[in-house]
Image (spheres, helix red, strand yellow):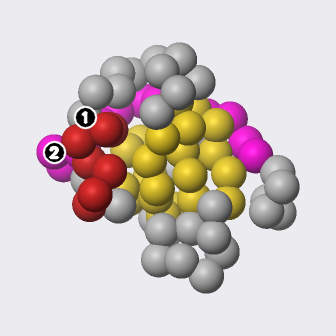
Amino acid sequence: MSRNDFEQGILKAVADEGMNLFLLDGTKWNIKPEDISTVLTWVPGATLRIAILIEESLYPYMLYHTGTGSYVRARKEQ
């Protein structure tokens, strides 16, 4: 994925008190601590847009909730 591209995903679960998200495609995302309160309002089934925010960052991705307009910064877990 390049900086101007984005992918879409469907939220499967919020886990570990908001520290992690799981998408239906099997990916796991670690959420930036400052954004945990936002992700705790998200419910399974939500559509998310995933884009690269800052490649050199510890949390290089932005996960954007298409229903609410809220977003969190995240990193993809292996």
Secondary structure of the residue carrying tag 1 is loop
**Mark earlier in primary sequence (2, 1):** 2
At 73% from the left and 42% from the top, the residue drawn is 7
Q: Is residue 11 magenta?
A: yes
* Magenta stretch bounds: 6-18
Depth order, front residue of 44/38: 38
Task: Give the residue pinned by disc 2.
Answer: 17
Three-letter amino acid code of the residue under disc 1? Leu
Residue 14 drawn at (x, y percent)? 30, 37
Look at 54% across and 77% down and name the residue there.
57
Q: Quadrant of residue 33?
A: bottom left
What label does residue 40 carry, if any? 1
Q: Is residue 60 above or below residue 31?
A: below
Left or right: where 28 falls relative to 43: right
Q: Viewer-nearest of labels 2 and 1? A: 1
Position of 20 relative to 42 (above/below): below
Marks 2 & 1, CB-CB < 8 Å contact: yes
How far is disc 2 from disc 1 in space, using C-alphas?
8 Å
Using the rendered view, name the quadrant where residue 60 is placed: bottom right
The stretch drawn in magenta includes residue 13 = yes
48 lies above or below 67: below
The x, y position of residue 41, in whole percent, is 28, 27
Name the chief secondary structure element in magenta.
strand
